[in-house]
Image (spheres, grey):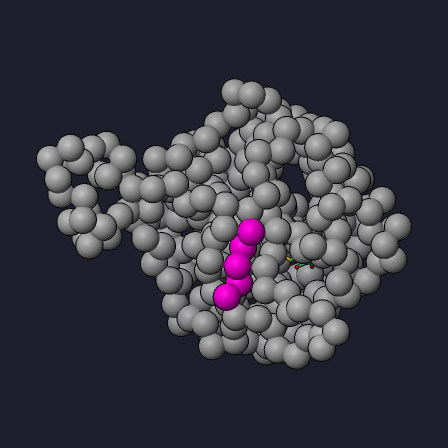
Amino acid sequence: MTGWRNLIHCEDALAGLARIPDDSIDLIVADPPYGLGKDYGNDSDKMEADAYLRWTEQWIDAALPKLKASGSLYIFLTWRYSPEIFVMLKQRMTMLNEIIWDRRVPSMGGSIRSFSSVHDTIGFFARQKGYYFDLDAVRIPYDAETKKARSRSIFVGAKWLELGYNPKDVWSVSRLHREHPERAEHPTQKPLEIVERIVRASCPPGGVVLDPFMGSGTTAVAAQRCGRDFVGFELNPAYCAIIDARLTAPEAQLTAQGNQPTEPVRAKLTSIKKGSRKKAAADLTPANSAADPAQQALAFDNLVFDNT
Ligand SMILES: C[S@@+](CC[C@H](N)C(=O)[O-])C[C@H]1O[C@@H](n2cnc3c(N)ncnc32)[C@H](O)[C@@H]1O
């Protein structure tokens, strides 16, 4: 495959991954269906447990050979299947962290026979010992008050005080509720703040990030904002149209490197409403697109993407 960077393929990841060259990817960010029955406009989240775990093993085995030796993988999961999937990955990679994403705002409703779940689980895995990791790119600056409290002469000019602190493994970032300025029309869109941290820490500048399950394209937008390339797949044509709109919005362009706080990506993204999803889906119905998934991907690439 030539010119495969900075393309989103509207296609089944299992089919498309085969075309990505082996040992070419710096970072995989995977946010697969969680096996919770969510509606992504397809049946991808409606598998029985056994089938879901078999399918998970299949895409993992298709994706991992694409990683460079220095590469790593982050996977978003919930408590429901993270134990099984972490075991699967630990047989193939080294586990470095279980990051807890505290979504802050619990989903509405929930059980009265157990505790409300308010976190996602993000597994961080590396292929080898010499994996790329740039902690300095994601340190959190100390606030003025903390710095003032450390004003005794022994602290003045201390590197750690200037660089900021390690974000640790509990990330407290609000989920993107309906009114959130970053929100697009996708039920499980992830906040840029989280994905940008992953990209800055684990993909070198100019490197390439693979996301097999793009959804609304958060990984692609994060990569672009951080000066990295991306490649990915998404089954639902309506979500592919959202990704295109997000990538071309001014807020999705390259931002300053370093310890810059993430600027929220604002209104334009929230204006991508159901109408445009339907239109995008109609534009890509079988009458307008090839039945062959590979050709469908090409057709879609020609239609909206070529950011190289
Ligand atoms: C959890 S969501 C990803 C959300 C994304 N991280 C975001 O921030 O918007 C999973 C996505 O995977 C897509 N999907 C499911 N099965 C797929 C497959 N086999 N190939 C490609 N995409 C798939 C679904 O349509 C859904 O949009």
Which quadrant would residue 152 be assigned to in this image?
top left
Judge from the rendering whether residue 61 lies leftward or rightward of residue 192; answer left or right: right
| First to last magenta residue range | 100-104
Q: Is residue 195 above or below residue 182?
A: above
**One can see residue 187 in this view:** yes
Image-quadrant location for residue 22: top right
Give the quarter of the image for residue 54: top right
Residue 202 in the image: state x and y as whole percent: 48, 35
Q: Please name whichever residue, 173 or 159, is drawn nearer the observer in this view of the structure.
A: 159
> Horizontally, is 284 left or right of 270 in the view?
right
**Is residue 5 at all visible to an observer of this figure?**
no
Left or right side of 173 for 240: right
Q: Percent position (x, y) of residue 102? A: 53, 59
Residue shown at 56%/51% (left/top)?
Answer: 100
Q: Residue at x 20, y 33 (%)?
A: 158
Q: Who's the residue at 62% across and 26% down the image?
A: 127
**183 in magenta:** no
Residue 102 in magenta?
yes
Q: Position of residue 295 (x, y in %)?
A: 73, 47
User: Quick check: 269 above or below 143?
Assistant: below
Instruction: Name the residue furthest left.
Output: 153
User: Residue 1 placed where, x, y %?
Assistant: 64, 31
What's the residue at 47%, 77% (across, down)?
179
Answer left or right for 111 relative to 26. right
The quadrant where ligand 1 appears is bottom right
The overriding secondary structure of the stretch rendered in magenta is strand
Which residue occupies the foreground of this view, 303 or 105?
Answer: 105
